[in-house]
Amino acid sequence: MSASGPRRLKPLHLFAVVLLSVAAGYALAISVAKSSAPKQTDYELPHGFTVSDPTFLPSALPGPTMTAGNRLELLENGDAIFPAMLAAISSARKTVNFEAYIFWSGEVGTRFRDALAERAVHGVAVRVLLDAIGSSRGRLKASDVDLLRRAGCHVEFFHSTKPWTVWVFNHRNHRRVLVVDGMLGFTGGVGFADQWRGDADSPEHWRDTQVRVEGPAVRGLQRAFQENWSEVTGEALVGDEFFPALPQAGSSSVAVVPSSPLAAMSGAGRVYAISLAAAAKEIWIANSYFLPDDATSSLFVAAVKRGVDVRVIVPSDEQNDVPATKAAGGSSFGPLLEGGVKIYEYQPTMFHLKTMVVDGIFSTVGSANFDDRSFHLNEEINLFVYGAEFAGLMKERYGRDLLRCRSYTHAMWKQRSLKKRVTEWLVTPFRSEL
């Protein structure tokens, strides 16, 4: 009997082993996702009051009430956003506090790097807080960080230690905040990378919105930065250089609402839910990653049933930087569309806004996506504004974006390909992590 080598698996057996290995890996991934999934809060929200009622704001807003006397400027796309922010940095005399999820090396990153370094060289106290995942070393060169530090900037990374821990990896700082001298602030959805250049005029130039803030609401932006900075460094930011007296600068009433998984109740998620329940006329949402859960979908459909015009703008399949999120959200589109919610896909480029207008009077711009990650896992920040003037401007911009959209119908959803259906099924268990 001749000696023989190791027995080789037959092709069919090999396929079975590979299939079982993939299935086991998928099951393990689901188990890990479920173990760190956020606790869901299903709000019991009957339509008992409207956005116009005096009880709405104290019911909807967590923490401090709205502050009056603010001046807001709505900035669209890189061509408007970046020059305004760079000019603000260049005007700094005492402090610059800069917080971002995405800060990548490139043309845009270099412009902000140099502006921050220039102020530090001239004696301004510059603090930079970046997310360790969003601004990872694969995207942000160590040489850029070194240049900032050599110039005198204090640069830190949020949750850069123990990234293998599920909680640390999942708990990301998704906020965008710039505060100059405690007097001038910015927030919104922008990333500091080359994708945000231009004016949404090509597939390479994304569509996004930022708000420039003057007045008492700047304190809320500063407190949000202080919260994350103190968590990372242990440094408390106190004194006139951070919290100076802020005279009224305009006529807008504003609430700055931070969200954090460490808080007892989700900030933005709670305000969104109560706003949906209170709406009497219209809910116009623009969001880059729209993944409503079953409870929230029910709020949308209930709003339609009482005559509310519910519209949602999302990225198209062709211009989406995270296709898995679109697939995860797509599974919920059918019931929404059948319930009368109008969904539109933005065509020219990636659509990165996180905005909402309710009844032409209550509106928001911020960093929070409409998903469980933003509502329960990330550090987020939203600016909520109460007033017809700013809401009217938001509606006008929304209308312009609609002109560049394709309507996504229930018939289109029913006719989606088998590949899309399978992808939706595969990513559904990970909805809370996307």
Image (cartoon, helix red, strand yellow):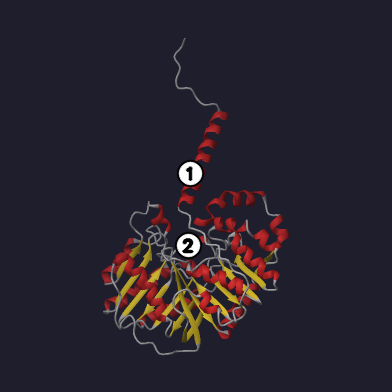
Residue 352 in the figure: left or right of residue 161: right
Q: Which mark, by number, is residue 426?
A: none
Q: Does 119 sit left or right of 354 as displayed? A: left
Residue 111: name its quadrant. Answer: bottom left
- Residue 105 in which image quadrant: bottom left
Residue placed furthest toward the right: 411
Task: Tell me if I can see residue 344 in this picture.
Answer: no
In the image, what residue type sits under mark 1?
Leu
| Residue 351: x %, y % from top left | 56, 67
In the rendered structure, which amino acid carries the disc numbered 2?
A: His
Residue at the far top: name it. Answer: 1
Which callout, 1 or 2, points at the residue further toward the start of the chain?
1
Residue at numbered disc 1: 28
Q: Secondary structure at mark 1?
A: helix
* Residue 385 place in picture, x, y as percent: 52, 80
Where disc 2 sits, the SS reads helix
Q: Is 34 placed above or below 190 here?
A: above
Residue 98 vertical position relative to residue 42 in the rendered view, above or below: below
- Count residues near mark 1 (Cα–Cα under 10 Å), then give few for <14, some for 14-19, many for 20+: few
Q: Please name the residue that numbered disc 2 is placed on.
A: 376
Q: Taking 287 as reference, is 241 above or below it?
A: below
Q: Where does the image place residue 408, in percent across and percent down from the top left?
A: 68, 63
Q: Residues within 10 Å of mark 2 (few under 14, many from 20)?
A: many
Residue 428 image position (x, y, % from top left): 57, 52
- Residue 272 shows in the view: yes
User: In the rendered structure, are the residues bearing label 1 and label 2 in contact, judged by CB atoms less than 8 Å apart?
Assistant: no
Q: CA distance from mark 1 to mark 2?
A: 22 Å
Count numbered badges in the picture: 2
Which mark's residue is nearer the viewer, 1 or 2?
A: 2
Q: Name the one closer to the observer, 391 or 197.
A: 391
Q: Quadrant of residue 112?
A: bottom left
